[in-house]
Amino acid sequence: MSGANDIQLRDLRDTILQLNNTINTQTSLIMSLQKSIDERNARIDEKDQVIANLQAQLDYLKNKLFGSTSEIRKNDIPGQLSLFDATDEDDKPAVPVEPEIIEVKAHTRKRKPKATYNEIFENIKTTQVPVDELPEEERKCPECGSVMVPIGTKVVRTEVIYHKPSLERIEYVARTYCCPNAEKEAETYFAYDKCKAALIEGSYVSSGLAAHVMYYKYVMACPLYRQEQDFLHLGAKISRATMANWIITCSQDYMVHMYDYLHQKLCKRMFLMADETPIQVLKEPERRPQSKSYVWVFRTGEDRGVPIILFNYAPTRKGANAADFLKDAPEGYFLMTDGYKGYNKVPDANRCACWAHIRRYWLRAIPKGHETDYTHPAVQGLLYCDKLFSYERTYKEKGLSVKQIYKRRLKEQEPVIDAFLAWLDGLTPKTGDSIIKAINYTNGCRPYLKNYLKDGACSLSNNLSENAIRPVVMGRKNWLFSDSQDGANASMVIYSLIETAKANDIDPEKYLEYLLESRPSADWSDEKLEQLAPWSKATREACAI
């Protein structure tokens, strides 16, 4: 009996051992399968993130192509609390600043009345045409049948007629004089009034015609080949090559002297801005026609002085171009730019970072559908930037002085920036191309984020430079490229004079003609050039809009 039990016990032990082996095998298989599942899930998560990033890029590109270009965003979201409105019970009360007496005029918002014809057409000639074809039977009074008598006039309707522009050829005719004894002389001598020299020697172009061509190319973005067609419709065969020669010659002979004077004035200012954009110049030494060249814009800031906007052509985007253009600027001046590292080569400047560019990166990092999600880091980063711009709008609405803005910025904006940077240091994003770009761009600008706080006349953003360079960006979509470096330099000179004129509220076409009529030269003094500056009294009267 014991032998049978031993056999049964051994069988049970073998069975248990086999079951344990089976369990171990199954466990190993399960662990292997779980590892495979985890790896697959990780790959799926990675692919999902790639898809999300690509979708975000697609949404961004679609918005750039078809969406609104405005960056204005409302922060008041129903049911959500503002990051900046919440208060902590343990917070210490703010230290009061000296009281500011600010007079704000009371106003009520009224609907603007519809403009009348007299307001719309006040600057064009008005001619009245009498009409009196009322039939005799309609001139009888419907009450008594008497013939009505005229007592006045009434404007029945208004229409505006377009007159085709025209060209006029003027020949300056001088009386010719000769010696009464000319027949006895071996050589006859004739004398006549040479009159004022031509704008360009040997050319028929007038100051008005040259200014018109420049205005239509650089303000109206009408390429020379289209102007060539327009002149042909007006009865004149003026080739695009001829007009290009007018532009270059007038720029080199006359306009560059005013440009140099404006450059000299700009380099005396303490608050400057800069930006750059690519253009194409076909004929550059040792470069392919497809190579990318650059237009640099340098302008005065918001220091409440007369605005000056200058453009400069350079074959490359090297920061040395900006450093060379601003080499005469005063030591310690403020230079507002975007995050391009090339501006680090500009010496003796307090470089300021553009908060509009920083805000733009955080705005782009917000995923579609998360615009109202205050828990998302991209939305939080945007709100920090919006808070700074909100303060700036308040300062302008109240008309604060430069000194008052300086004090208010230190009290209100510096804590926001400190909190923003502390919050930024705590971010640890695992995925997301857009938000990583926003973090990297902001960190790249970190050394310059608070420099604008040093003076109340310094700007918070570089938007003025972006607005100034926009005409070049829009113009190149039409004229596409410059043929030569001379053409590119001439374009920059004329763009500078046009945009500075517009910034000083004078008519740019009239100003170009005014300069060409005056014909400044290299031997003119600064005092004489000052009389032709866009802000001078004589210029403003001659070139009023």
Image: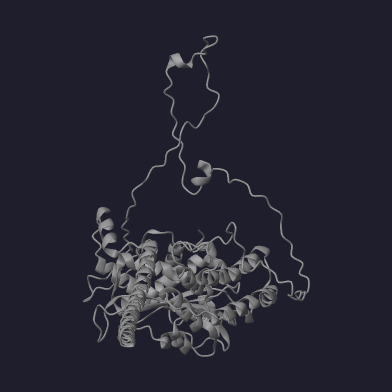
Residue 6 versus residue 282 in the image, above or below: below
Q: Where residue 228 appears, x then y in whole percent? A: 26, 61
Relative horizontal placement of residue 417, taking residue 491 as reference (left or right): right
Q: Write the residue at 46% across / 16% down.
A: 138
* Towards the viewer: 482 or 69: 69
Q: Can residue 242 be spotted in the picture? A: yes
Relative horizontal placement of residue 264, taking residue 162 as reference (left or right): right
Q: Total of numbered circles in the picture? A: 0
In the rendered image, the residue lying farthest to the front is: 1
Q: Write the residue at 49% across / 32% down.
A: 155
Q: Where residue 307 appears, x then y in whole percent? A: 54, 72
Relative horizontal placement of residue 350, taking residue 321 as reference (left or right): right
Q: Where residue 37 appears, x then y in whole percent? A: 34, 75
Q: Where residue 48 appears, x then y in whole percent? A: 36, 70
Q: Quadrant of the N terminus?
A: bottom left
Q: Write the residue at 44% across / 13% down.
A: 137
* Towards the viewer: 119 or 150: 119
Q: Which picture quadrant has residue 8?
A: bottom left
In the rendered image, the residue lying farthest to the top is: 144
Residue 217 versus residue 125 in the image, above or below: below
Q: Can residue 179 be spotted in the picture? A: no
Residue 291 versus residue 391 in the image, above or below: below
* Towards the viewer: 146 or 416: 416
